[in-house]
Amino acid sequence: DYSHAARFMTVNNWKIFGLTMRECTNLKAIRFSGCDLSGEELVAFFGDGMGGCPLEYLDLRKNSLGTIGIDALLPLLESRQELSYFDLSQTHMDDEAARKLSEGLNHCRIRCMNLECNQIGDNGLESLLFS
């Protein structure tokens, strides 16, 4: 849990941290709940995905991700077949972010996903349900 230290990290720190984590061949869980992550910081961390990490659990709740953050997650979702748990609750998602997320869900099966407390309307929900 890096929530306290994350508040003091720069975008460049997130990039270095992400590059280091991509080399972990047994990384199964990432929990960045309440880290005040922005979409730009998420782009820096995930870059073009997480390589060969056997990631199963991803908790990004309580961050200001929005559409930029969801864009950053697309390479990650496209690089794997499945995630067991994916928490995007309270991440400032709207219909556009939900539509972007649905693109990534065409590649990756999610067993359990939490999207509560976002601003997703009927159009966004429809995109997610029929992806």
Image (cartoon, rainbow, N blue to C red):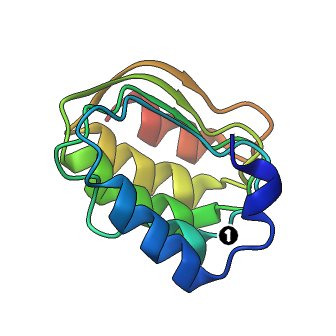
Instruction: Work out which quarter of the rendered image holds the N terminus and state it.
Output: top right
In this rendered view, identify the residue nearer to me: 94 or 84.
84
Instruction: Work out which quarter of the rendered image holds the C terminus and state it.
Output: top left
Please tell me in which quadrant of the rendered image residue 128 appears.
Answer: top left
Res 87 visible: yes
Q: Position of residue 3 (x, y in %)?
A: 77, 50
Q: Position of residue 125 (x, y in %)?
A: 55, 36
**Residue under the image location 30 percent in, 55 percent down:** 22
**Residue under the image location 80 percent in, 37 percent down:** 117
Whether residue 25 sits left or right of residue 38 in the image: it is left
Whether residue 30 sits left or right of residue 84 in the image: it is right
- SS label for mark 1: loop
Q: Say few, some or many: other residues with alpha carbon within 10 Å of mark 1 (under 14 / 14 to 19 / 20 or more).
A: some
Res 36 visible: no
**Residue under the image location 29 percent in, 45 percent down:** 24
Q: Position of residue 75 (x, y in %)?
A: 27, 58
Indicate whether 57 appears above or below 95.
above
**Residue under the image location 79 percent in, 47 percent down:** 34
Indicate whether 15 appears above or below 84.
below
Return the residue at label 1: 38
